[in-house]
Amino acid sequence: MKRIFFLLLTGLMLYGLPANAQLQDQRSNLAIGVNGGVNVSSVSITPGFKQSKLIGPEFGVTVRYIGEKYFSMICGIQAEVNFSQRGWKEVIEDGTGNTYQRAMNYIEIPLLAHLAFGKDKGRGVRFVLNLGPQVGYLVGEKETMSDAWDPSGRTPNEQYGKMADKKFDYGIVGGGGLEARTGIGNFILEARYYFGLADFYNNSKKDPFSRSAHSYIGARLTYLFDIKK
């Protein structure tokens, strides 16, 4: 409950600040488009094991509304529906030569406060920031392991063959990048970081893992075209 309260409070603060600020210059810019990129992911898990990063795809649709300019800061909100692959790749150093990775596919919905600095209207480049809560739902997962597989004696090893207990996920996502506004649309190159607040395994005292949450760094390119300027 504390995590859910923190998530909701963060979202209210993000959306409430621009709304309560003195309006400097109103806007009414609606844009829609598509995004695509890659996630470099791992998991925060206790008890832990050595990991390297898993690289997976991310793509989806984006809707953005800019409602005002407050001094030099352009303020709006942004919503997305994305397919996102996360998971982990283990580094196994027990001499067996085993390899293992877990890919977990989610439908994600981030709801973001959007801030921009720079060129306001017309063509040009501006710096953008996006920050807010994100929810996700697990739609599939797959283990990939070496043909010669021997996990006996490895600790922990309860994760092998154990699918996620919880499909619903939530956390905080934020990032920044550059937006180029052109005559054929707007192109945004952005880096993001996601910090998961939910565990995908049960975490009671009788369960093998007390913590099992996602995190990833993402790089993406978004194309938006203006519906209403």
Image (spheres, rainbow, N blue to C red):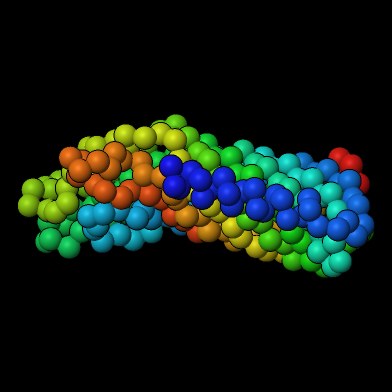
Q: Is residue 82 left or right of residue 201?
A: right
Residue 51, picture quadrant: bottom left
In this view, the residue in front, 64 or 38, is: 64
* Residue 99, image x, y percentages: 23, 52
The percent coordinates of residue 39 (x first, y second) are: 50, 53
**Residue placed furthest toward the top:** 139
The residue at 74%/66% (across/down) is 127
Front residue of this view, candidates 160 and 168 = 168
Question: Residue lying farthest left?
Answer: 153
Residue 73 placement, left or right of 8: right
Quick check: can you spot residue 116? yes
Q: Residue at coordinates 43% horizontally, 42% vertically from top-left? A: 1
Residue in the picture at 8% in, 48% down: 152
From this view, report whether residue 74 is shown above or below residue 227: below
Q: Quadrant of residue 21?
A: bottom right
**Measured from the top left, where is residue 189 in percent x and y?**
68, 60
Instruction: Tell me: residue 168, above or below residue 153.
Output: above
| Residue visible at 89% across and 42% down in the picture | 228
On screen, residue 138 versus residue 70, left or right, reads left
The location of residue 128, given as percent across then percent down, is 72, 62
Residue 219 at least partly seen:
no
Q: How many marks?
A: 0
